[in-house]
Amino acid sequence: MSFSRWWTETTAALGDQVPLPLVALLLVLAAVLVAAGWYTFPAWIPRRLPRLTRLRRRSRKSPPPGGTPAVPDPREPEPELPAAAYVSLADRFAAEGRYAEAVRERLRAMVRELTARRVVQPRPGMTVVELVRAATDTQPQVGPPLTAAGAIFSELWYGQRPASVEHDRRMREHAADLDRVLTGRPEDGPRP
């Protein structure tokens, strides 16, 4: 039996049992419901199941029975570390030969120091250029070391250049210059 003959006989048998206009109306209604569901797909699915939410909240407050602490929630802001913690991390990265990460952590230490001294108020998503501009608007003398440090960071992270010991050394010098500017100490003399 061919498909067209099967289709004709099936449609005729269905037409004898149910009026065809009603079948057509039901098919159109089903198509509209599927289209509406497809269009509004994320809205009609619950974001979180209530039972899982309670378990997740409980696990954040206390460590699970195994003694391993719960994974931090990415929506909660990280506690701000002091600048010395970033410098220590940068030193560790440099000792491991991970110079790009060391440069990033030294810049974070510089930003943390500027924030602690209320020279700049960083915002999420702030670029290095915006940070330098905000800092120099408040205290112009921080401009040269911060601009040079931002250039090294941008070259490595945005320009995706390979990092070297020289980048870390220069970043240390810029961090020391920024510290001298912020504390008001005179320069130590010529660099070797």
Image (tube, rainbow, N blue to C red):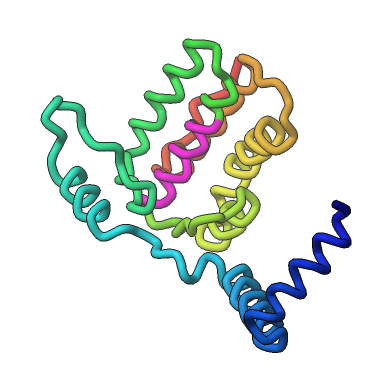
Is 90 situated left or right of 18 in this image? left
Q: Could you tell me which quadrant the C terminus lies in? A: top right
List x then y, in percent, for residue 166.
64, 17
- Does residue 130 lie above or below 188 as drawn? below
Per the picture, the main secondary structure of the magenta-coloured stretch is helix
Q: Residue at x 79, y 67 (%)?
A: 9
- Does residue 104 lie above or below 192 as drawn? below
Q: Residue at x 55, y 12 (%)?
A: 97
Residue 59 is drawn in which quadrant?
top left
Is 81 situated left or right of 123 in this image? left
List x then y, in percent, for residue 5.
86, 61
Please tell me which residue lies in front, 55 or 108: 55
Is 102 situated left or right of 114 in this image? right
- Residue 170 is one of the magenta-drawn residues: no
Q: Residue at x 65, y 34 (%)?
A: 157
List x then y, in percent, for residue 12.
76, 75
Q: Residue at x 70, y 21 (%)?
A: 162
Q: How many marks?
A: 0
Give the magenta-colored segment's residue range: 104-117
- Does residue 12 lie above or below 132 as drawn? below
List x then y, in percent, for residue 25.
67, 85
Please tell me which residue lies in front, 100 or 174: 100
- Does residue 21 lie above or below 102 as drawn? below
